[in-house]
Image (tube, rainbow, N blue to C red):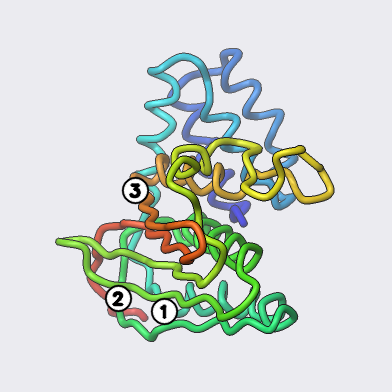
């Protein structure tokens, strides 16, 4: 979820940067929706057709990142999704880590949550494992599942809005297909590349790449 204080701070800064023009007036109207769990609202704000406006919004968002202890953050997300996994007979496991990353905790938590939710949805036996490993000078948060996997021809489509592997008929009862699209957009905003490795019938591995950060002395 987007933390209200964080979003309010970001929108305040956007208004200061752009002045009270049509763009920021629209953002101010969306303020009332921020306290509802709707990160899509902020994503829409960042889709301003003017390249300079969108670039400035992304730059401002990047400035709001800080050092994040990954273990407790991922633990919270795994705990939230564990009941749903257990209801399907799946195991959800976190490999312990002492890593710290440079990110926004609220947005990163949403990204990981969407990926775990997606993994649980498309896995019928086995389970989901979440871990952190080095990727050069960065960290790579991996969500690995034993699910149905993704065919090669679908890999370029899964991050599109409303695309669902198991819902070609666009049945709204199966959800809207926004989960991975939100992950991709948040990844762009935070400069956290998203990697995916998958084959049909062999499960999937999604990775979020983020910079390393030194542990906080206040942790």
Q: In this view of the protein, which residue sits in the foreground, 213 or 25?
A: 213
Q: In this view, does 132 lie to the left or right of 147?
A: left
**Residue 61, relative to residue 196: is it above or below?**
above
217 is higher (above) or lower (below) than 143: below
Placement of the C terminus among the 4 image quadrants: bottom left
Q: Cα distance, mark 3 to mark 1?
A: 20 Å
Q: Up-down: is 7 above or below 209?
A: above
In this view, the residue farthest toward the right is 173
To which residue does mark 2 refer? 99
Residue placed under numbered mark 3 in the picture: 193
Mark 3 and mark 1 lie on one chain; the one further toward the N terminus is 1
Q: Do the residues labelled 3 and 2 touch (CB within 8 Å)?
A: no
Eye-nearest disc, 3 or 1: 3
Distance of label 3 from label 2 (alpha carbons): 18 Å
- Label 2 near label 1: C-beta < 8 Å? yes
Asked where in the image residue 28 lies, by quadrant, the reply is top right
Q: Where is residue 194 in the image (x, y as percent from the top left)?
A: 38, 50
Q: Nearer the viewer, residue 118 or 209?
A: 118
- The residue at which mark 1 appears reads as 71
Q: Are marks 3 and 1 in contact (CB under 8 Å)?
A: no
- Label 3: few (<14), some (14–19) or many (≥20) C-alpha neighbours in 10 Å: some
Disc 1 element: helix
């Amino acid at each position: 979820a987007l933390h209200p204080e964080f979003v309010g701070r970001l929108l305040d800064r956007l208004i200061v940067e752009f002045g009270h023009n049509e763009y920021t007036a629209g953002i101010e109207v969306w303020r009332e929706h921020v306290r509802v769990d709707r990160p899509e609202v902020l994503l829409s704000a960042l889709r301003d057709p003017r390249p300079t406006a969108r670039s400035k919004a992304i730059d401002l968002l990047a400035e709001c990142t800080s050092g994040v202890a990954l273990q407790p953050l991922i633990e919270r997300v795994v705990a939230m999704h564990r009941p749903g996994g257990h209801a399907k007979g799946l195991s959800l496991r976190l490999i312990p880590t002492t890593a710290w990353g440079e990110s926004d905790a609220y947005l990163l938590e949403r990204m990981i949550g969407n990926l775990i939710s997606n993994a649980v949805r498309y896995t019928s036996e086995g389970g989901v494992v979440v871990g952190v490993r080095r990727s050069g000078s960065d960290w790579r948060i991996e969500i690995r599942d034993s699910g149905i996997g993704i065919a090669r021809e679908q890999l370029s489509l899964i991050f599109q809005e409303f695309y669902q592997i198991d819902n070609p008929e666009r049945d709204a009862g199966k959800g809207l297909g926004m989960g991975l699209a939100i992950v991709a957009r948040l990844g762009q905003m935070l400069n956290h590349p998203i990697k995916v490795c998958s084959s049909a019938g062999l499960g999937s591995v999604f990775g979020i790449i983020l910079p390393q950060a030194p542990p906080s002395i206040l942790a």
